[in-house]
Image (tube, rainbow, N blue to C red):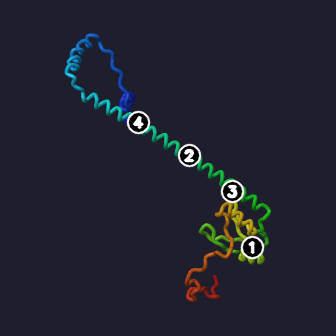
């Protein structure tokens, strides 16, 4: 598909420059041109070529307009993406400030509280008092920077307002009930089962 530059320009509707003709040839063509002028017969091939070249120019303009519109759309989408990233970064900074000094994680905690987060079962270690408060809705679990933090309920709700996806666990009484038939005796785990 390597066309010469001349062929490409002709394809876009540019006209080729007419080569300079010798004076003898001009005089030879004049009688023929005068005969055509006397008969007043329009040259359909020439007018068809003008219409076709005008259509090609219109098509080129349409492609140029479409390319400009697509460029503007890409720039607008990129700007929206950057703005969303900036807003998300600000929200994460706010969450980090909220969690500063309010984390109640205890290094000596031995009880494990399991919960579902992002479709996976996660766990956090708590004390007996924290477990009761967590299940009562007085505490919540927030995920930040890959760690789970045990925080008071008001901090957990503030984090939920900033970025709802970071609230990992908060028992406020609206949790889903067990599915129907889940407590069926046929499916209960026996007490003497050893894992």
Q: Quadrant of residue 115?
A: bottom right
Quadrant holding the C terminus: bottom right
- Residue 147's disc is none
The residue under the point 21% across, 25% down is 41
Residue at the image position 47 percent from the left and 40 percent from the top: 67
Pointer 2 or 4: first along the chain: 4
The numbered mark, 4 or 3, whose residue comes first in the sequence reads 4
- Residue lying at 69% horizontally and 56% vertically, measured from the top left: 91
Which residue appears at 71% of the width and 76% of the height? Answer: 135
Q: Nearer the viewer, residue 19 or 49?
A: 49
Label disc, if present, on residue 138 of the rendered structure: 1
Q: Secondary structure at mark 4?
A: helix
Residue 65 position (above or below residue 168): above
Q: Which mark is residue 76?
A: 2
Up/down of 129 relative to 51, above or below: below
Q: Are marks 3 and 2 in contact (CB under 8 Å)?
A: no
The answer to which of marks 1 and 3 sits earlier in the sequence is 3
Q: Residue furthest top?
A: 24
Secondary structure of the residue carrying numbered label 2 = helix
- Mark 2 or 1, nearer chain start: 2
- C-alpha span from label 4 to label 3: 47 Å
Q: Where, by quadrant of the figure, is residue 141 drawn?
A: bottom right
Question: Compared to 165, does 172 lie above or below?
Answer: below
Q: Quadrant of the N terminus?
A: top left
Q: Which residue is mark 3?
A: 91
Q: How much space separates mark 4 and mark 1, taking CA atoms?
A: 67 Å
Residue where numbered disc 4 is placed: 60
Disc 2 packing (10 Å; few <14; some 14–19; many ≥20): few
Q: Please determine whether, in this image, residue 98 is positioned above or below residue 11.
A: below
């Amino acid at each position: 598909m390597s066309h010469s530059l001349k062929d490409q320009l002709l394809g876009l509707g540019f006209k080729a420059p007419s080569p300079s003709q010798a004076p003898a040839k001009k005089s030879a063509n004049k009688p023929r041109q005068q005969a055509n002028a006397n008969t007043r017969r329009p040259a359909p091939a020439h007018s068809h070529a003008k219409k076709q070249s005008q259509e090609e120019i219109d098509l080129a303009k349409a492609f140029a307009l479409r390319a400009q519109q697509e460029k503007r759309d890409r720039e607008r989408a990129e700007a929206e993406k950057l703005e969303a990233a900036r807003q998300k970064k600000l929200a994460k900074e706010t969450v980090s400030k909220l969690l500063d000094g309010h984390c109640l994680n205890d290094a000596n905690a031995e009880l494990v509280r399991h919960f579902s987060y992002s479709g996976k079962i996660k766990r956090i270690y708590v004390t007996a008092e924290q477990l009761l408060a967590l299940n009562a809705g007085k505490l919540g679990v927030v995920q930040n920077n890959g760690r789970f933090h045990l925080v008071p309920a008001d901090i957990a709700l503030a984090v939920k307002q900033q970025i709802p996806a970071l609230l990992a666990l908060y028992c406020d009484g609206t949790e889903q009930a067990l599915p129907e038939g889940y407590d069926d005796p046929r499916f209960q785990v026996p007490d003497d089962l050893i894992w």
